[in-house]
Amino acid sequence: MEEKVINAALLGLGTVGTGVYKVLKGQEEEMTTKIGCKVKIRKILVRNLEKAAAKVDDPAMFTNSWEEIKQDPSIDIVIELIGGIEPARTYILDALHAGKHVVTANKDLIAVHGKELLDAAKASHVDLLFEAAVAGGIPIIRPLKQCLAGNHMSEVMGIVNGTTNFILTKMSQDNMEFKDALALATKLGYAEADPTADIDGLDAGRKVAILASVAFNSRVVFDDVYIEGITKISAKDIRYAKEMGCAIKLLGVARNTDTGVEAYVCPMLIPNDHPLATVNDSYNAVFVHGDAVEDAMFFGRGAGELPTASAVVGDIFDIVRNIVANCCGRIGCTCYKQLPVKRMEDTYNRYFLRLHVEDRCGVLAEMTEVFAKYHVSIAQIIQRDSQSQDDHLAEVVVITAKVREGDFKTAVQELSNKSSVKRISKTIRVYGK
């Protein structure tokens, strides 16, 4: 009996594209038993044919014409790994309208145009899967859509950028300053030549938009996510966090509250007894809370050639099983709600505040008076002699109870205008109750 073959086209042969090619080659012998048929890469779209030739067994697969792939009726699955918004968006829409299934790892595109793409997939009754768009090799999209679908999710949060986690780990473990840790990350290949998307939190912000949409069944796009990066975190902040029994991590947080969805990315102090506090180096982890499952954590490599390829190939195999069973398009867009997304000013968190003030009686009383005026409750306060050359200053660290962000910022602004407060050095959110 002739073996059934599903043909696929690969768009892009960079780091992840090469990984997908390797993983599919390594699965060839077991494919039919595992998923019911073979998957063959028939076409690979690249810009530089000569440069790509050394990466595959048969260079005849290469093309630099999207139309050649789009118009080939034998290609059932398009695997988009070129990244960015355009031409990826056009290619994916073309493929979906032509009745081809799509697998993508494109977080930029899904975080902005996810609804448009999923609607197109639904109209053509084909699959659009994007497991690799969020946490590399860590399964999280499929668990949220399927394994955990019986839950009402109230929170999904975690460390979803390996570059920033590596930098903060080196700052914590080796007492490095930010610029030195970034230089090391660049040298070792964890950071890109232009690390802006990572260190400014943009990469994590796109992932939070996707996670919130899937977890809460309501559309959250990239522009809805409040974002702060790690560029202002110092070794001194790390040391204070350690003294307080905390680590500093760049966290992506999405909460489903009674008044709307909260979605933000920022550095936060997290208690050492929380599982995420021990996630170090380039590892990622996503922590979810549901009404039935309670707490669950997904941990692993959040990026890289083979970890990301693992997630892409998992999506390919899922689509192939659907094709074999004639049941494609079963699970598409799950955003059936229209929940409001809250402004950051209306979210509630605890805060770490470090400032330099005049070293005299009555200054702390002035501070607490301002805090009380704006309903900011103080949970902990530490005063130290300033390391500044000015012997008349003291360094004060305040940890607040949970407070509305808008009220806290107003209080800090009023404090900064007082003559007794010489410098507001840092404000960092604190995760937890």
Image (cartoon, rainbow, N blue to C red):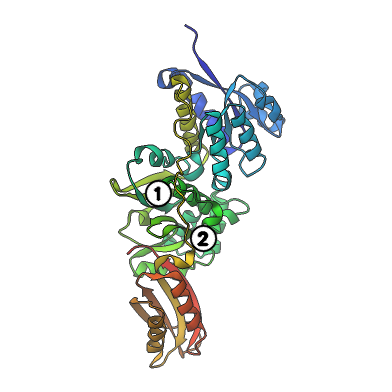
Q: Residue 198's mark? A: none
Residue 280 visible in the shown view: no
Q: Is residue 93 left or right of residue 283?
A: right
Q: Is residue 155 left or right of residue 129?
A: left
The residue drawn where x is 70% and y is 28% is 67
Near-viewer residue (67 or 59): 67
According to the picture, the residue beneath numbered tag 2 turns out to be: 226
Q: Is residue 152 left or right of residue 260?
A: left
Q: What secondary structure is found at the residue carrying circle 1? A: strand
Q: Where is residue 285 in the image (x, y as percent from the top left)?
A: 40, 49
- The image quadrant that residue 48 belongs to is top right
According to the picture, the residue beneath numbered tag 1 turns out to be: 286
Q: How crowded is the residue under tag 2: few (<14 C-alpha within 10 Å), some, or many (20+)?
A: many
Q: Position of residue 190 (x, y in %)?
A: 53, 49
Seen from this angle, which residue lies furthest top? 1
Q: How crowded is the residue under tag 1: few (<14 C-alpha within 10 Å), some, or many (20+)?
A: many
Q: What secondary structure is found at the residue carrying circle 2? A: strand
Quadrant of the rendering where the C terminus is positioned: bottom left
Residue type, label 2: Tyr
Near-viewer residue (433 or 277): 433
